[in-house]
Image (spheres, grey):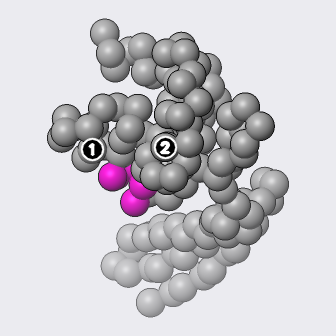
């Protein structure tokens, strides 16, 4: 068996992507394997949103995204409560509700949160939200 390893690295802001190409010669067939590594600020840094004079950290972990999806599908709580409550926390949700913001502002806040969680621009999230609702 013949094995050759080639390592190529690319750096894009805080994401380090390394492609490991491993070729194994077995019965005249070449196999190709890839390995990618993501590290740096992308893993530990959380996005934030400012509402009035308060700044809230957005939980953009996969577990939060899954809880939001389950909560919205369950229908036991309203979409605002599920999305804002899960992504910003219960205390933040209570504080935002106490502000008695207009419906349009609350809707924009939800879109901003979903954009941050899914690593989209606000416009991309807004278009996705419109498509899913129609």
Tell me which corner region of the image, top left, top right, bottom left or bottom right, holds residue 54.
top right
Closer to the N terminus: mark 2 or mark 1?
Answer: 1
Residue in front for this viewpoint, 47 or 123: 47
Residue 63 in view here: yes
Residue in front for this viewpoint, 80 or 66: 80
Disc 2 from disc 1: Cα separation: 17 Å
Which residue appears at 25% of the width and 46% of the height?
A: 70
Residue 3, image x, y percentages:
54, 85
Which residue appears at 42% of the width and 14% of the height?
A: 130
Residue in front for this viewpoint, 123 or 2: 123
Residue 80, image x, y percentages:
41, 32
Q: Is residue 58 above or below residue 15?
A: above
SS assignment at label 1: helix
Q: Name the image quarter holding the N terminus.
A: bottom left
Residue 126, image x, y percentages:
52, 19
Label 1, residues with CA under 10 Å away: few <14, some 14-19, many ≥20: some
Residue for badge 1: 71
Q: Name the image quarter holding the C terminus.
A: top left
Q: Residue furthest front?
A: 98
Label 2, residues with CA under 10 Å away: few <14, some 14-19, many ≥20: few
As drawn, is 125 to the left or to the right of 26? Answer: right
Q: Does the magenta stretch include residue 34?
A: no
Q: Is the magenta stretch mostly helix, strand or loop?
A: helix
Which of the labelled discs sits on residue 25, or is there none? Answer: none
Which residue appears at 78% of the width and 54% of the height?
A: 12
Residue for badge 2: 94
Report the mark closest to the observer, 2 or 1: 2
User: Which residues are the magenta region?
Assistant: 63-67
Q: Is residue 63 above or below residue 28?
A: above
SS assignment at label 2: helix
């Amino acid at each position: 068996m013949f094995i050759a390893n080639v390592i190529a690295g690319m750096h894009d802001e805080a994401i380090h992507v390394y492609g490991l190409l491993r070729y194994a010669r077995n019965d005249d067939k070449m196999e190709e394997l890839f390995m990618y590594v993501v590290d740096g600020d992308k893993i530990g840094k959380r996005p934030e949103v400012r509402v009035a004079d308060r700044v809230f950290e957005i939980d953009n972990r996969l577990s939060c995204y899954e809880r939001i999806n389950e909560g919205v599908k369950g229908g036991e709580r309203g979409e605002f409560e599920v999305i804002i409550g899960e992504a910003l926390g219960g205390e933040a949700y209570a504080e935002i509700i106490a502000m008695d913001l207009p419906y349009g502002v609350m809707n924009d806040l939800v879109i901003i949160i979903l954009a941050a969680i899914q690593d989209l621009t606000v416009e991309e999230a807004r278009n996705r939200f419109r498509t899913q609702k129609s």
